[in-house]
Amino acid sequence: MGITLPILILCLPLFMFLLLGIGGVKMSRKVAGILGILGMGTTMTLAYIVAFTYFFSGNPEFIIDGVRQQYQVFDVTWLAFTPKLVVNLGFLLDPISAMMLVVITTISFMVHLYSWGYMEHEGGFQRYYAFLSLFSFSMLGLVVATNIFQMYIFWELVGVSSFLLIGFFYRLPSAVSASKKAFIVTRFADLGFLLGILTLSYFTDTFNFVSMTSNPMNVLAETGGATFMGCSVLTWAMVLIFTGGMGKSAMLPLHIWLPDAMEGPTPVSALIHAATMVVAGVYLVARMFPVYCVVEASMTFICCVGAITAFYAAVVACTQVDIKRVLAFSTISQIAFMMVSLGVARDYMIPGEHYSGLGYMAGMFHLFTHAMFKALLFLGAGALIHAVHSNDYTKMGGLRKYMPITHWTFLIGCLAIAGIYPFSGFFSKDEMLAAMFARHWFWGAWMTMVAGLTAFYMFRLYYLIFWWEENPEYEHHKPHDAPWQMSLPLIILAAVSCVSGFIPFGELVTWNGAPYHIHIEAPVAATSLTVAVLAILLATVMYRKKNPLPEKFRNALPGLWTAAYHRFYWDEIYLFITHNIIFNGICKAIAWFDRHVIDATMDGFAKVTQKVSYSIRGMQSGNVQAYVLWYFFGALALAIITLICII
Amino acid sequence: MDLNLLWYLVPSVVMFACGVYGFVTRKNMIAILISLELMLNSADLNFAIFNRFLFPGSMEGMVFTLFAIAIAAAETAIAIAIIINIYRAVGSTNVLESNKMKH
């Protein structure tokens, strides 16, 4: 493959960012919007060409004997620290990066189009499009990184663009604090990521993914038996790298930024905080998968973190009032699902298991389908907010008559995430659950329960928005469907969510490139489908029409409900730690030391200098002859000293 | 009586001391300039003396003296020009009255 297309995929969004960022002030909204959409459309087309060439051309660069290869389109030296330790910039094509190219550019294009309608009456329209382009550039750079350091650079860039877009409404104090929170929490996690990278590269002398993942046992051998605090150094490195993924993917306990990130414009939430950026952690684990497999402990850690987070987020999502928060917690839960799926996968055959890499394929499959239906749900939520001017479901209800397009597409999204046949979520979730059951029944049972909760809270949300009871305020302000720029992406994404489950994903994306033929495992599928249908029925009974049942449930378990409503007090715990312990305890002592020791020393120097200057300034009389006399005596003294020294 | 190095150096030192004394004590700028010339001339004298007694074969000291005299003449011209300007500005050539630089 030539170098032109891959370079263009990266450079076009960057160019659009510079163009809209610098020249946007001089453009009208329409020009800026059309330019942004066209730029992203072109990038999408190019990415499709590259991805389809990779998957379907049969070129020996990409596929040898039916096994897909990792292909570095280019990999140029950027920083050479030592002859062995070199940071490169490049473009890596392999199944997951090609898949991500498609996902990112599709969702990004949909969001560009949707924003044209959604942001029509907002200020800073051009700036918004510039930031969207910056994000697309950074995310594309992240997924095609050939080495972990390049990934880290783009990892930070997506963090910055996320920060800029969450704080887009910078006049709202809540948006400002949310963007700060997101940046600080993810930065904190990225510190772990950086430490992990440095630890790993210290032993392996390389940042390159291909050389690390093609021979993971070599990595293990290079770290030797080095241990630190009872764990091998490689375990530490892999867990620290995963910490970065935990921050970006909002895993417990670093999840606190994602619900607040919903302060950003809704299309941004769809693009960054649901479909693409937050799955970067999953992508990172998938990228380093063979190395993770060498370290059993890190895989167990990933599984545990994922399982706890998935359950926690699902429970919290059942009680939230803000529809975007429900979707945010749902995102956290679904990403945790993918993490568990990766955590149960192995790159070697386990006796009695027909394919131990299934979890990897299923996790990536779910990443793909989830990106589509979660973007759909968020964009649907945006259309609702656009119509009702509130994030609160209590201001909605009975909207199905007023907004048919939004209603049907949202329903498709809910069915997909609940895992109902034949929508896309069913297929990916089924594969994931099959992989988990194959590993251990506990993981399978636990995650089936989470899947049931998912179906319940999504349909709770659906019924509360579209059924329940009509808000009397509709009399004054009748809600209606969004303009075509907003409806079209909804329809396209809904169509994709209907059919994408039938993509033979196992033929395209597996951990080692060898094709895997997906077949639905009847017992697992039946179980998960039954659980989902039961959960939906429960939600129907409780929320289809206004009735006192939800109130009764709430009053039956007041403690649990309040705790879940307050997200199990994680934010309060963080506030307590930062304010009471760090700010009031540690920082006060440091501030005292700074003021009374360091500053005082410096002030002392200044004071002494000043005192001495005042005392001798009478000598500077302005009388030239006095100066000469001083000079003369000085010269005389020097001469005498010299004489004494010589004699 | 043998004329050795000391016989030449002593008048030079006396001349230099007179120059220093005059430079510090006189208040008229022209007088200060004259004292300065005295010091300069004693230095020129030293050049010539040392050349004559220590390196009789060469001429560098003499040539240096000639250069110094020429430059001293130029310096004097500049100094007098400055003094005239100060006189125009302050209305006096008294060195005690031109102490505005300290402010």
Image (tube, coloured by chain):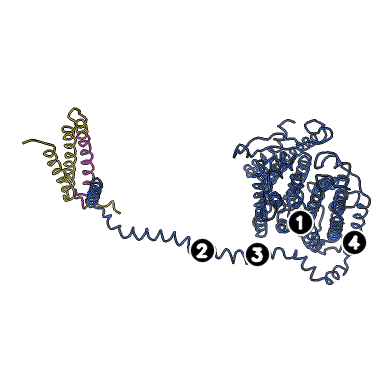
CA distance separating discs 1 and 3: 21 Å
Are dots 1 and 4 in contact, CB under 8 Å? no
- State the count of labels: 4
* Closer to viewer: mark 1 or mark 4: 1
Q: Helix, strand, or loop for circle 1?
A: helix
Dot 1: chain letter: A
Q: Which residue is mark 1?
A: A305
| Lower sequence index among marks 4 and 3 | 4
Quarter of the picture containing the N terminus of chain B is top left
Dot 3: chain letter: A
CA distance separating discs 4 and 3: 41 Å
Residue B26 is at least partly visible in this image: yes
Residue type at mark 1?
Val
CA distance separating discs 2 and 3: 21 Å
* Closer to viewer: mark 4 or mark 3: 3
Residue type at mark 2?
Phe
Q: Helix, strand, or loop for circle 2?
A: helix
| Lower sequence index among marks 1 and 3 | 1
Name the residue nearer the viewer: A481 or B72.
B72
Q: Position of residue A594 (x, y in %)?
A: 51, 61
